[in-house]
Image: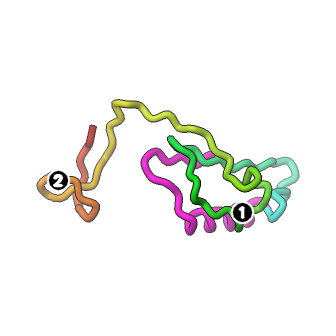
Amino acid sequence: MIEAKGATGWTNKQMKSKADRMIELFGKDGGKWPKVIPHYILMSPRPQRDLNLSSWQEWVKNGNEAYWLQLVMPDDLIKPTRCDKKGEVSIDGNYWKIKR
């Protein structure tokens, strides 16, 4: 499984929830399903350094770090951005526009 984020990072709360879900799906040792070898990989433009992985099982992480792949983002990325009614970028806005 690869979870990708292009613009935002992961929170420790999110990652604790994901680690708990991995245990539910694959067991504490990752061996719940004999013919399945689970892998969990984070993918983003930069590795996230501030994650607390203490709740992760050993098979979900690479030592003290998450398995990670670099996500190359295009320079001409077009993305939806939250804005207000006038089109001004706003985290509290109820509208969306395309930003280049």
Quadrant housing residue 55: bottom right
Q: Which residue appears at 26% of the width and 65% of the height?
A: 92
Q: Amino acid at mark 2?
A: Glu
Residue 76 shown left or right of residue 18 in the figure: left
Foreground of the two, 56 or 34: 56
Residue 45 shown left or right of residue 85 in the figure: right
Instruction: Tell me the number on the disc at residue 8.
Output: none
Q: How is the image coloured?
A: rainbow
Give above or below for 76 relative to 86: above
Q: Amino acid at mark 1?
A: Trp
Instruction: Give the extent of the magenta segment.
Output: 1-26
Q: Which residue appears at 34% of the width and 30% of the height?
A: 76
**Residue receiving disc 1:** 56
Q: Which residue appears at 83% of the width and 55% of the height?
A: 33
**Residue receiving disc 2:** 88
Q: Secondary structure at mark 2?
A: loop
